[in-house]
Image: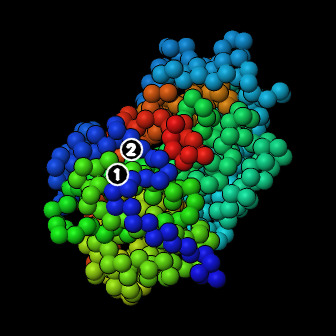
Amino acid sequence: MVAAACGGDDSSSGSSGNASGNTIDAGVKAGVEAALNGGATTAPGGASTTTAAVPQPTSIDAWEALWAKQRDAIVKRITDNKWGKSADGKTLTGPAGFTIDLSKCPAGWSDTEGLTDTSMKVGLSLAQSGNYAEYNNYSKSMKVLFDYYGSKGAFKDVNGKTRTIDFITKDDGYDAARTIPNVDELLDSEKVFAVWTLGSPSSLKTYDKINQRCVIHPEAITAHAAWGDPVNHPWTTGAPNLSYSSEAILWGSFLEDHLGEFPTDRKIKVAALVVNNDFGKLYDGSFKAFVAQSAKLKDRIDYSTETIEAAAPTVTDPMTTLGAKGPDVFIAMVAATPCTQAVTEAAQNGMHDAVKYLFQPITCAGTTFVKKEKVGGDGSASNNWWIVNSGTKDLTDKAFQADAYVMWVRQQLQAAGLDPNSSSLLSGGVILSWTFVQSLLIADQLPGGLTRTNLILAQRSLDMTHPMFIDGVRFHMDGNKDAYFIEGGQYQQWDSAQQTWVPKSKVIDLDGQSKNCAWNATAGVCG
């Protein structure tokens, strides 16, 4: 059963580049190089940052005041530029050339479907069972914030309609074949105002249909580069997160930065555990592409992988195979349960002590994938693992327990009967729901009030201070010019004694440097 689930490709691709044809985003690469500045990932304060840090508010009231001011500025920008739906209802315009031809929407399409005078229907298909069930924590904290603002009467639009969010979730078990009928049901039976999806495979299988139906597909819960496509998929925005392809650039840049630490009489062995789906393939292809174009690495890296299926019960066999290769560097290109399994297997098969650098993926950022309660014993199995984090604040990490917004959110979760220490993914739900809430509050104040077109216009115009990101991370989207909310990250290393992720660089902010991505599913590359 395990053997069937785990198939290795044993691809020693050192200088052969990338079979999928992936290329490296030159803007992101240049931004990373400038930030790292020739050697900056060994101690806090070593790297430069492209965005000056500013003091964040120290109370929830101060936060709310700041957001209100920022929302007013966004509404003013939109109205001053006369962006929005045209008088004939055929075109939506927005910043930086953003436009949607509404005449191509289906017959009978409604800009307000899913809305009543008192509620809005919002649907989400995600894993609530199986290996990826922990990601259901996203929906739990999302509902808490939705209910909080709804109970306050915050969603009151210019037409005097005050609404709450009717949040409908459906389990797909992280199986795209189950996501498709879930999305169909949300669109056709529930007739939701907006629909969310989780996971690259599921989102890629459904975002064409959602866009063709002219329905809001906000913050697809995945960091695939494909969501940065405002021209061909204008109704889809990606989650506030560093993209997987940019993360791969940061892995490669790290190796360039630490090249002098490895023997020169042989190639550097890099091993990766790769989930066999769309997001794993993007990780793998992007890393290969970086190595192929790197003058420093292309002749120095011996890269091998083992793949697993998303439903694989264990990672023992592929990790054993990778460990036998004697790697110098290991990268987990997986998510959910396999992240923790990779840590425990590496400790048991000797990789933890023998491998110089081990990396967890951004999909498993947070403490609860590596804390001692998960990996067992004294927690030393996860000690010194590295990660590239988008700069998110983790509700479970003691480093943020004095943060005003984190304290407030923890109180809200506790009041709703949730343990804020139970999962780092509750933090992800807060990140997503805060973004959606602010978008709704902006859309409510635009001419015509809350509509699908006003909501996507609000998202494409967002430029605010997100309370769940550390200083130096800009939260920003700008029509066709900048299609990613977050572009940047920070190298961190796990300290098992302190049970916290320790920063090993300043924030590397790449805001505005990622190219848009018209995803070519056949070739597996951005067009």
Query: Dot 2: few (<14), some (14–19), or many (≥20) neighbours within 10 Å?
Result: many
Residue at x-position 63% and y-position 24%:
100
Residue at x-position 62% and y-position 55%:
201
Asked which quadrant contains residue 64, the reply is: top left
- Of marks 1 and 2, which one's residue comes earlier in the chain? 2
Residue 525, x across and y down, in percent: 51, 44
Label 1 to label 2: alpha-carbon separation: 10 Å
Q: How is the image coloured?
A: rainbow
What residue sits right under mark 2 in the picture?
Answer: 24
Q: Secondary structure at mark 1?
A: helix
Please indicate, yes or no, whether residue 232 appears anywhere in the rendered image.
Answer: yes
Q: Is residue 71 above or below residue 319?
A: above
- Looking at numbered disc 2 in the image, what kind of residue is underneath it? Ile
Please indicate, yes or no, whether residue 57 appears anywhere in the rendered image.
Answer: no
Can you say which quadrant of the picture contains the N terminus? bottom right
Q: Is residue 40 above or below residue 523?
A: below
Q: In the depicted view, which residue is nearer to us: 48 or 143?
A: 48
What residue sits right under mark 1 in the picture?
Answer: 292
Q: Secondary structure at mark 2?
A: loop
